[in-house]
Image: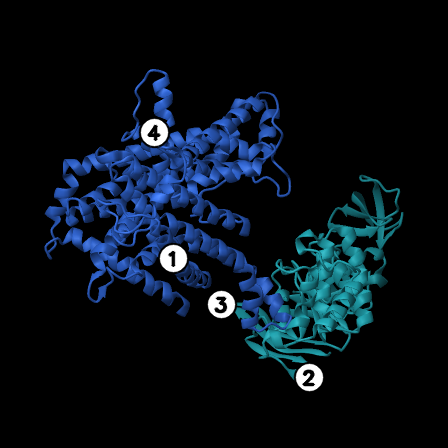
Chain colours: A blue, B cyan
Amino acid sequence: MVVLAAPVVFLSVFFLVPAGTLVLTGLRPAGAWDTGAVLDVLTADATRRVAWFTVWQAAVSTAVTVVVALPAAWLLGRIRIPGRSVFAAVLIVPFVLPTVVVGTAFLALLGDGGPVQQVAALAGVELDLRQTVTAVVAAHVFFNYAVVARTVGAAWQAVDPASEDAARTLGASRLRTFWTVTLPQLRPSLAGAASVVFLFTFTSFGVVKILGGPRIATIEVEIHRLTTELLDLQAASVLSLLQLAAVVSALALYRRAGVRRGTSRARPGRSTLHRPVGAERALVAVTVLSALLLLVVPIGTLVWRSFATADGLGLGFYRALSTVRRGSVAFVPPIEAVTNSMVFGVAAATTALLVGGAAAVGLHRLGGRARGLADSSLMLPLGTSAVTIGFGFLIALDSPPLDLRTSPVLIPAAQAVIAIPFVVRTLLPALDALPERLRDAAATLGASPRRVWLEVDAKLLRRPALVAFGFAYAISLGEFGATVFIARADAPTVPVAIFRALSQPGALSVGQAMALSTILLVLTTAVMLVVDRVGDQRVGGF
Amino acid sequence: MQLGLQGIGKSFGAEPVLTDVDLDVADGRTVALLGPSGSGKSTLLRIVAGLVAPDRGTVCLADRDVTTVPAHRRGVGVVFQDQALFPHLDVTGNVAFGLRMAGVDRAERARRVEQALELVGLPGYGRRDPSTLSGGEAQRVAIARALAPRPGVVLLDEPLAALDQLLRERLLLELRTLFDDLDVTVVAVTHDPTEAGALGDRIAVLLDGRIAQEDDAGTVLARPVSASVAGLVGQRNVATGLLRAGRVECPWGSLPVRAPGVPDGRVAVLVTPAAVRVDPDGPLEGVVTGRIFRGGSAFAVVAGDGWPPLDMAAPSHWRVGDAVRLRIDATQVHLMASGS
């Protein structure tokens, strides 16, 4: 399998070597196996606190997200209202936003001068939710709302209403029908969506880093702190291993759960949607309004505050992006980060498309067990958190023969590693879905094998490839966890520049962070809109 | 273009799919390859098209051995079972595909596409997207696409399986006329004896990877060579009997038969529905257990004690439950090899 050589080499250098070095750093801190040191880290009070917090904030975030998003899932799966597709499209926006933007948006919402504090002040209450778990959970719900609404909504739409009608004619009440007929058919999608949300919130970095402050830390955040502030690489490595183990087991559980699926598929071509009647109208209104409130208010506040300077609405914060302030830790005008991000994005997305495309073609041609095995190993970077990858780069690729620390390829390479699983997940189903008969038909009509590839495969894969590229580009634009480790001080990306601005005192810094976040918001949304237009297929599914 | 297969063998793993298949189709003739699912007929078709290489044997087109010629250089047109229309091309793009591969220039291509669409009764459909076509329309486009490059041989894989009954019969007759007009050599794979009879001048019956019978369509349908072939072509009045001195002893009685060349001993007895007569003095006493209409004619199943039920043409006034007496017209009894 020549075509698999490229992904194997690439992932060996940019994933296995960093991850392997990380493992060795953790287990052999002084060049010798040291299980005692590992146990010391694992049993330390600080570790237990961080691990416990990571788990329960993820559990709470997941539970709240499922409950809050379920009405929207019902609406998407069952109800026909004007603007339904627009509603579905708007829902997905937060999910594709960079975590740093989400963090900044909630800071804009909850921070000094933000609407929440102002409203509370009107009621005579002093309310500062910054650096609280509430803020983190709220941001997680905002971020993952679409995962539940869209996944469960799609499953709901696939549930044959005839099965519900049957239950009703057999004497079940509406509620009873929901509990005994509808909900069991939704359970696989609920479990799937919940595991995805749990995984995302478990490995949450950018949101917690920005909203949590110094007192709140997930394992991801703690790894970053140990590395950059305490320089305790050994403890950081052990935590990375802990994180990796947890994520891999969660993914394994998710896969097992995903196997068992049983729903009465609605007959294709028959709509399962109906216009809302009676009390449903009120529920629809409440759902749409609350969804828009949840989604629009944080983003709206972010955009508004990026223009709200001390002298009234204006472009002050944006203008300040092109200057280097005295006493600032930034070596370059922050606006350069936008150019950096866009250039890195093209490099990362191109790399991810080439490497991931080769991997997808290779997997497509492999059969049976070999494919399952290769598939799982290609998905490993997905199970590895971004922080782990960035940290691995930092400690592995800094000495000969691979001294890449100052090399410009480092950031695109790390971002490509993160994007490759999504590229494969977009291209492989498209490849598998190409009917063999189309190739046969082309061959019997006189197309040589090369011509078959050009006329059939390449033409039918053009859209999925564009979608994969756009998706990888968006991932690269927003990537924070890995990039923050390896970005050079004089060449930050936008998320890194936002983070740096937020860690400086002063209203101007915060304003600059909001302006940069707004720019990133616009860029990412534009890319995703193009992706959405190009391919109507769903992207990046697990 | 004449098509010849000699000694074709093919196994998938340890499983033999085709064993020593010989088949000759004269230039311009139509052969229906009739077989149940799993009989290897689609594999045989793919071997002729060059999509699958046989383990043994040769494929000849116009007396040229093409066994090792790849599909794209064979010039064999294929109409696939699910049409396999290219979703990224409109109807014109689909029909023009083979012409484009052959390097036919644009103006000529447009002319031939128009011609092909006209031929299948879809003029003006060029700009349509395949996803907007009905099943019958898609099938016609697939046929136009296969015919447009003017192949010497056209293969059809269950061409009408996906269509409803009425449409199927209409397309069957149209196809037959089309092939006669075009003077093209055709092999059509089907599991349906009606379809085989309507499409093929000749029928080749494929059972368990071997040609069990190959003859004029009428002969195969009326005088199958074995009980298995009889079952496949829809003849149900089959039983085992013993032939001795011009009489056959079978569950329906002792019947005088003329069967020159059939040695005495165990035989399979086929009684065509037309051979079962109503006779108040007949030896077979039975009860009508089922009744169906094919077109305007009534058929009935009559069951009795000690003999297998008989399919027969029946008077339309018969009701289920009626007691009837029957006689078998021994001149219309057909003897076959027993065993298979």
Q: Circle 2: is it few (<14), some (14-19), or many (20+) Cα within 10 Å? A: few
Question: What residue is rendered at 44% in x and 47% in y?
Answer: A523
How many angstroms separate mark 1 from mark 4 (CA)?
Answer: 33 Å
**Secondary element at tag 1:** helix
Tell me the distance, in whole angstroms, between the alpha carbons under discs 3 and 4.
68 Å
**Percent of width and height locating residue A271:** 63, 38
Residue B203 appears anywhere in the view: no
B267 up-or-down from A126: above or below: below
* Location of mark 3 (residue): B13
Looking at the picture, which amino acid does disc 2 mark?
A: Asp
**Viewer-side label of 2, 4:** 4
| Location of residue A375 (image quadrant) | bottom left
Label 3, residues with CA under 10 Å away: few <14, some 14-19, many ≥20: few
Q: Amino acid at mark 1?
A: Val
Q: Position of residue A533 (x, y in %)?
A: 54, 49
Count of number-bearing discs: 4
The residue wearing badge 1 is: A343
In the displayed image of the protein, which residue is found farthest to the top?
Answer: A124
